[in-house]
Image (cartoon, grey):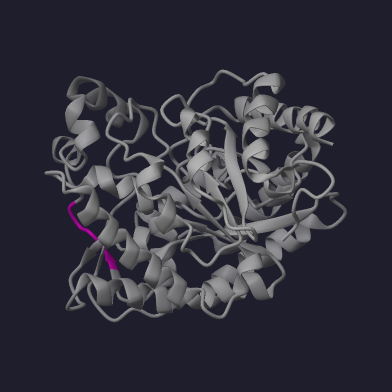
Amino acid sequence: MKTSTQRILTTHVGSIPRPAVIQEMLRTRLRGEPVDEAEFNAQVRGAVAQVVRQQAEAGIDVVTDGELSKASFIAYANERLTGCERVEQPPSADARQLTRREWMAYPEYYAEYLKAQMPAGANVPIECRGPLSYKGQQLVQRDIANLKAALAGVDVEEAFVPAIAPGTFARGANRYYKTDEEFRFAIAEALKTEYEAIVNAGFILQIDDPGLAETWDMFVPAISVEEYRKLIAIQVEALNHALRDIPEDRVRYHICWGSWQGPHTVDIPLKEVVDIMLQVRAQAYSVEAANPRHAYEWRVWEDVKLPDDKILIPGVIAHTTAVVEHPETVAERIMNFARLVGRERVIAGADCGFAQGAFYARQHPTIMWAKFQALAEGARLATQRLW
């Protein structure tokens, strides 16, 4: 994995708003209706080439495909794993609001927000009803080929491909395995095939695991912090099982507290999970650090030692607001981390993806690209001061 040996490198989390034509084809597929696969693949291939070029032009050093072929993490994993089936009757809006303590704490706000920004039915939940195994070899190779083609002639440092963590996928209902632990390890063993395919193709593997921190909000009623830590420790153990044959310097790991715009007053603090996060077999850790709820948490690294061979990818631009960060603000945030862990061990990133799947864009694409440019300019300012 490239590191900031001579300057602060830049990257982001991955998900980019999909073009309308791809969105519509993904919606059709989710409804169980056929799409013209040749046309879909052509649209995705062209869109990936465009977003890779745009990332490079904006000043992003470590780029990705924007996850453009995927409807969502749950939907894409469902396509690639046997044993999973879509839930025929998705929960109603009222029932869905009762699944998070955050959403229950602000019922008037979320009654409007969920209906407008995260409508029910756009992302159909799934259940595990049989033995899990990987069947997505052709699909992951398509994504790899599209990204390789898009990188031809583009001047960037490196490229990564995101994939879901077993613990996050395991939030779907288990109707087959005897225990939740057995369920998580079965997911891990299946996803291992995808993880290794990405790394063997020469890309950095990014494990996306909002479930490490965000699942805290989904326990209704709340459990103790210690109980929660025991649960996510098992998730990390399952993930490490899947990563056991992959060199750590080919893996980066992302956590967040959910990409929706809301109060987030129920978020568990980073200090409560950071030691468990650092147990993941990865070289780099991507963590939200720019939004108003978590911006103070750079101070966690005053007390927590980042292991000498590890890298931080702090979010220094936020997906939660349309306000474009001033490059000086970005530089200041980078400097805070660099002073604590060392300039060579900081890669400047974003808090989360700018689209939660294909249908939930968090900001207009023009705002996202402006933020990426601010990220790159802030990294240049920080470089001048640190070197």
Residue at the extreme left of the image, as rendered: 221
Q: Is residue 100 above or below residue 382?
A: below
Please give the name of the residue rendered at 27% of the width and 40% of the height, measured from the top-left corner. Answer: 120
286, 159: nearer the viewer: 286
Quarter placement of the N terminus: bottom right
Asked if residue 318 lies left or right of residue 387, the reply is left
Where residue 137 appears, as percent x and y from the top left, is 54, 76
Residue at the extreme front of the image, as rendered: 303
Instruction: Please give the range of residues in magenta.
Output: 85-89
Asked if residue 98 lies left or right of residue 15, the reply is left
353, 265: nearer the viewer: 265
The answer to whether residue 257 of the structure is visible from this angle is no
84, 380: nearer the viewer: 380
The quadrant holding residue 324 is top right
Where residue 288 appears, as percent x and y from the top left, is 50, 39
Please give the name of the residue rendered at 40% of the width and 42% of the height, measured from the top-left corner. Answer: 270
Where residue 123 appears, as percent x and y from the top left, is 34, 48
User: Is residue 152 within the magenta segment?
Assistant: no
The quadrant holding residue 159 is bottom right
